[in-house]
Image (cartoon, rainbow, N blue to C red):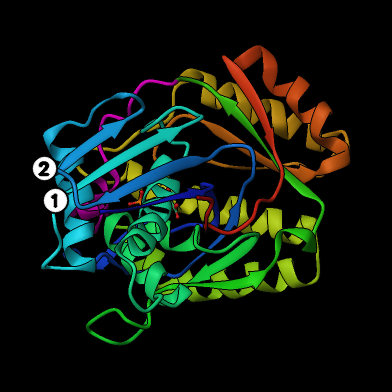
């Protein structure tokens, strides 16, 4: 029996991922660019060699589906593995559009490979492993700004998270307005497949994705917030247009979402460089300079149940 504990932070996409080119391997149809955030975190312990497979998630027994997803990842790491116990805790809401699956599978990949022992996996291998649990998790293996490319290989070995710039590169923050903590109605895999099969905008979304990524990368390299913000909002609203034109429509927004969007745009009209993004949930996430964070939080406050200001964070790592 051996045990390891790892910690990982969620990441929020600046240039968004929506759509798969291979569902079983979790390979994306579009590349993406993300920012890993400190403050929110998943801590996961893997006991390699237990009486039976068991998942404890936030101090309760994992559901059958949750347990299967976790154990599938351990099977991929080692098909001849012993029964394992996995204990995972998030210090933020799970499954509510706050990227808890990204930090969860990144922490699991690191903890499991360390608990197993043997030759260490490279960060790219860990990223590929995490990707198979949740696509966006492959970006949380890296701190700061990370890129996930589509890759060309059928086995997906060249579709992993790669570092673009560390957390210290740029003094920006993500101010998260929590509109609702209810679990999302349609999960990302089901939603992405629905969009691929039914949205008339999907082919255009995929065709424009490489240019969107390059624009985002250039803006991060130059620390140009207006340019990055424009690219991020464009990618966000294109993704939500694809979601909303799927059949049946995927509308992740709530009234509070729209109110928060207008509040941020009003602030921008007053000269604050604040830019919005949203994922498969109602939360509004605002990218801005650290020095503007409290003004942005104040603007969001009337429309949301909670506000969190998160700075760029570090890579997934073993802590015990
Ligand atoms: O990694 P998944 O399967 O949870 O999908 C994430 C999809 C979005 O959050 C909507 C966008 C992204 O790039 O993170």
Q: Nearer the viewer, residue 80 or 305?
A: 80
Observer able to see residue 279: no
In the rendered image, residue 318, in percent from the top left (x then y), is placed at 50, 56
Q: Which mark is residue 83?
A: 1
Q: Nearer the viewer, residue 133 or 58?
A: 58
Tell me: residue 161, above or below residue 87: below
Tell me: residue 55, above or below residue 260: below
Where does the magenta region start and end?
Answer: 181-199
Q: Left of 286 or right of it: where is 319?
A: left
Point 56% across, 64% down: residue: 142
Residue under pointer 2 = 52
Q: Quadrant of residue 221?
A: bottom right
Point 57% across, 33% down: residue: 284
Observer able to see residue 42: yes
Give the residue furthest to the bottom: 153
Which numbered disc flags the more N-terminal residue, 1 or 2?
2
Q: Quadrant of residue 155?
A: bottom left
Counting labels gives: 2
Q: Say whether marks 1 and 2 touch (CB < 8 Å).
A: yes
Q: Nearer the viewer, residue 239 or 218?
A: 218
Tell me: residue 273, above or below residue 17: above
Say which quadrant the N terminus sits in: bottom left
Q: Left of 30 or right of it: where is 41?
A: right
């Amino acid at each position: 029996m051996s045990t390891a504990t790892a910690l990982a932070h969620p990441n929020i996409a600046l240039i968004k991922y929506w759509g798969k080119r291979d569902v079983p391997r979790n390979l994306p149809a579009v590349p993406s660019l993300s920012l890993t955030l400190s403050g929110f975190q998943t801590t996961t312990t893997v006991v390699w060699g237990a009486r039976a497979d068991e998942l404890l998630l936030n101090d309760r027994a994992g559901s059958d589906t949750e347990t299967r997803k976790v154990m599938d990842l351990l099977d991929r790491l080692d098909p001849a593995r012993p029964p394992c116990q996995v204990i995972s805790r998030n210090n933020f809401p799970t499954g509510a559009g706050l990227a808890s699956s990204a930090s969860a599978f990144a922490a699991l990949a690191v903890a499991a490979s360390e608990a197993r022992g043997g030759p260490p996996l490279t960060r790219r291998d860990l990223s590929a492993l995490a990707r198979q649990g949740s696509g966006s998790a492959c970006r949380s293996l890296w701190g700061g700004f990370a890129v996930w490319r589509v890759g060309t290989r059928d086995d997906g070995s060249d579709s992993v998270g790669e570092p673009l710039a560390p957390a210290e590169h740029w003094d920006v923050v993500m101010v998260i307005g929590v509109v609702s903590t209810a679990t999302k109605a349609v999960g990302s895999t089901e939603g992405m497949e629905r969009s691929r099969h039914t949205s008339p905008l999907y082919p255009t979304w995929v065709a424009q994705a490489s240019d969107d990524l390059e624009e985002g990368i250039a803006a991060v390299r130059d620390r140009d917030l207006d340019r990055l913000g424009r690219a991020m909002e464009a990618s966000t609203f294109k993704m939500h247009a694809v979601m909303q034109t799927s059949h049946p429509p995927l509308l992740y927004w709530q009234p509070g979402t729209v109110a928060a969007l207008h509040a941020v745009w009003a602030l921008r009209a007053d000269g604050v460089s604040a830019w919005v993004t949203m994922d498969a949930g109602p939360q509004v996430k605002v990218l801005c300079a650290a020095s503007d964070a409290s003004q942005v939080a104040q603007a969001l406050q009337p429309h949301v149940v909670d506000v969190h200001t998160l700075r760029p964070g570090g890579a997934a790592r073993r802590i015990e």
